[in-house]
Amino acid sequence: IANLFKENQDYQVDIFEKNTSINLDEGYGIQLSINSIKLLNRIGFNTLESKDIFNPKKIDFYTIKQEKKICDLNISDFNSEDCKYTTLKRSKLVQFLKDRLNDNVIKYDHSIEKIEKKDDQIYLTFNENNKAICHHLIISDGVFSNNEIKSSYNNSVAIRGNISKNKLHNLNEKNISLFMGHNFHYVIYPVNKENENYNFIGVLKYQLKAKELENYTLFKEETFIQGIKDKLQNEFSTTFLENINNFKCFPVFVSKGYLKPGKNIFL
């Protein structure tokens, strides 16, 4: 959005980032629909090197237990010459967006503590009493964008990782592979033309107590991660599990409502 607005001289754009930096570590992938690509092309996404992206042909659906293919969906049917369903490394996308902005646009270590409205202006107070005034405010923090409607844990843990191409068997390398089970499903797909490392993401049903959710460092603890791995051994082979690199876990949250914050504020 900042990249789009900066094309118009009538707007001054600031990004207030609550973290001290933007994570550009190599690693996980992202899938972009054709509508996403259409919007991104307006700010030059189609200038990315072709080796850094991948255009899958289909989504193949499998059962987890027998690894038996159920059906497929031909997503390339919806492609046009300049807008194609795309996968790539998330870090490549973030780097592309960040590089197009001037260094002074992003203000790091700015966590909003108070929002006040007066006339047509919005007054922001950040940590350490930093202040800013704007005419329009876009809050982009997913289900945590509005603290008046509390997000709740969805009894699920997301698992991310990478797996080498040579550790995969009987999969079509041109496609996204989706494996479905009773309490678990996972997706594997390539993130660039080299196809050496595939993105892995799964969602596992997993109960957590309220105290566990308050301790966000829990998801980085070896004992907790091992507990997730132990449960996954019932879902697929130990060999497959051992070949997942950069194994990380995240709790999944959902928002049960949507609050309209009023004029000139968007979630």
Image: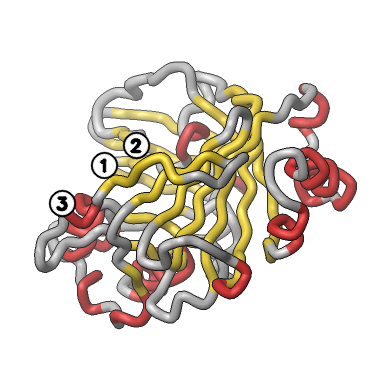
Tell me which label, 2 or 3, sits earlier in the chain. 3
User: Which numbered marker is on residue 120?
Assistant: none
Element on which disc 3 rests:
helix
Q: Residue at x 16, y 53 (%)?
A: 77
Q: Label 3 is placed on what type of residue?
A: Phe
Q: Position of residue 158 (x, y in %)?
A: 61, 42
Q: Name the residue at the right extreme.
A: 223
User: Which numbered marker is on residue 78?
Assistant: 3
Q: Tag 2: Cα neighbours inside 10 Å, few (<14), some, or many (≥20)?
A: some
Q: Label 1 is placed on what type of residue?
A: His
**Location of residue 19 by image quarter:** bottom right
Q: Residue at x 37, y 60 (%)?
A: 175
Residue that numbered label 1 is attached to: 135
Tell me which label, 3 or 1, sits earlier in the chain. 3
**Location of residue 218 by image quarter:** top right
Name the side, left or right, on which 154 lies relative to 207.
left
- Residue contact at pointers 2 and 1, CB within 8 angstroms: yes
Q: Position of residue 18 (x, y in %)?
A: 55, 51
Q: Position of residue 124 (x, y in %)?
A: 44, 40
Please tell me which residue lies in front, 27 or 103: 27
Q: Residue at x 36, y 45 (%)?
A: 133
- Residue contact at pointers 2 and 3, CB within 8 angstroms: no
User: Disc 2 versus disc 3: distance between alpha carbons?
Assistant: 41 Å
Name the side, left or right, on which 131 lies relative to 4.
right
Q: Residue at x 60, y 22 (%)?
A: 152
- Residue contact at pointers 3 and 1, CB within 8 angstroms: no
Tell me which label, 2 or 1, sits earlier in the chain. 2
Residue that numbered label 2 is attached to: 122
User: Disc 2 versus disc 1: distance between alpha carbons?
Assistant: 6 Å
Q: Label 2 is placed on what type of residue?
A: Ile
Name the side, left or right, on which 74 lies relative to 182.
left
| Colour mapping used in the image | secondary structure
